[in-house]
């Protein structure tokens, strides 16, 4: 009887968990669904009360107008020029640093790692003015360097995730490589890094998402219209009255499409990387 009660209790708990997850999913997906729905609505249905989640007369005119008003291709290219080198550089830096903190022994390692983690508590807005002044003095304003270099040097979060993943790799693999005559660099590139596919995919998705959706950084450092990223170009379609919501939603949908495709391809590695880096020592 007690065993049956425990079994029913586990099923009830599982059903409750699924119900909570479903409720959270509804709240998370509702803005996304509203954006897609608004992007294909004619003007007379946008402000309908109650909200029409499924348009009565869907249209693609808003997407055609978005292409006419927003230079989607240039904005996408400019965003790629920022996001790709920033993400690749950040992956390389975080991988080397994470491996050093996880597997190498050197004086002050733990203290340096603790100091690095403490920087996660520092809001980015605190360093905005000193960074701007420094970049202005070296002539980097209205260039992509202020948007690429900080990300390419690695973030504390990325280094922490890589350190956690590398810490889960058995030391015996590294010892075997050392006995075979491999130096630390060869051990990292030939033995350790090839095993870090899920963690690398996780950081790639997170890094590209952050760089792709960045609006504040380009707003501060980029002044030339032809250098603006996709987020700035979409925001530029707004006027003093807020712009046309359907066109803005169409532009936002087009800007989000590459990230959705990326996540669909990297979803398995992304989930695996988060699972394996979140619970290790």
Image: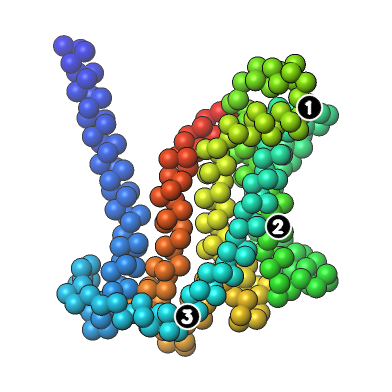
Residue at 70 percent of width and 75 percent of height: 142
232 to 34, vertically: above or below: below
Q: SS of the residue at dot 2? A: helix
Examine the image and state in which quarter residue 115 appears. Answer: top right
User: Residue 72 shows which numbered tag?
Assistant: none
Marks 2 and 3: which is nearer the front?
3
Can you identify the residue that label 3 sits on? 70
Between 249 and 122, the residue placed more toward the observer is: 249
The answer to the question of whether label 1 and label 2 lie on touching residues, with beta carbons closer than 8 A, is no
**Mark 2 crowdedness (10 Å alpha carbons): few <14, some 14-19, many ≥20:** some
Q: CA distance from mark 1 to mark 3?
A: 52 Å
Can you identify the residue that label 2 sits on? 150
Marks 1 and 2: which is nearer the front?
1
Can you identify the residue that label 1 sits on? 183
Q: Position of residue 209 (x, y in %)?
A: 52, 56
- Of callouts 2 and 3, the N-terminal one: 3
Marks 1 and 3: which is nearer the front?
1
Between 194 and 41, the residue placed more toward the observer is: 194
């Amino acid at each position: 009887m007690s065993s049956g009660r425990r079994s029913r209790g586990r099923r009830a708990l599982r059903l409750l968990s699924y119900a909570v997850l479903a409720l959270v999913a509804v709240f998370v997906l509702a803005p996304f669904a509203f954006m897609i729905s608004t992007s294909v609505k004619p003007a007379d249905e946008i402000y309908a009360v109650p909200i029409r989640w499924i348009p009565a007369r869907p249209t693609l005119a808003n997407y055609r107008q978005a292409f006419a008003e927003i230079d989607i291709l240039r904005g996408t290219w400019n965003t790629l020029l920022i996001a790709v080198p920033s993400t690749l550089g950040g992956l390389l830096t975080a991988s080397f640093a994470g491996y050093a903190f996880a597997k190498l022994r050197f004086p002050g390692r733990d203290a340096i790692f603790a100091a690095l983690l403490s920087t996660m508590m520092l809001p980015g807005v605190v360093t905005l003015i000193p960074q701007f002044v420094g970049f202005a003095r070296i002539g980097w304003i209205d260039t992509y360097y202020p948007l690429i270099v900080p990300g390419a040097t690695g973030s504390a979060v990325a280094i922490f995730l890589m350190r956690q993943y590398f810490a889960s790799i058995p030391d015996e693999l590294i010892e075997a490589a050392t006995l075979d005559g491999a130096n630390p660099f060869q051990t990292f590139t030939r033995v350790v890094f090839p095993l870090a596919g899920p963690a690398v995919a996780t950081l790639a998705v997170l890094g590209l998402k952050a760089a792709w959706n960045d609006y504040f950084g380009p707003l501060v450092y980029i002044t030339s219209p032809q250098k603006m990223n996709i987020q700035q170009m979409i925001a530029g379609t707004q006027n003093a009255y807020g712009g046309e919501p359907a066109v803005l939603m169409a532009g936002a949908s087009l800007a989000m499409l590459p990230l959705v495709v990326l996540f669909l391809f990297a979803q398995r590695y992304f989930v695996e990387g988060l699972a394996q880096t979140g619970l290790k020592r």
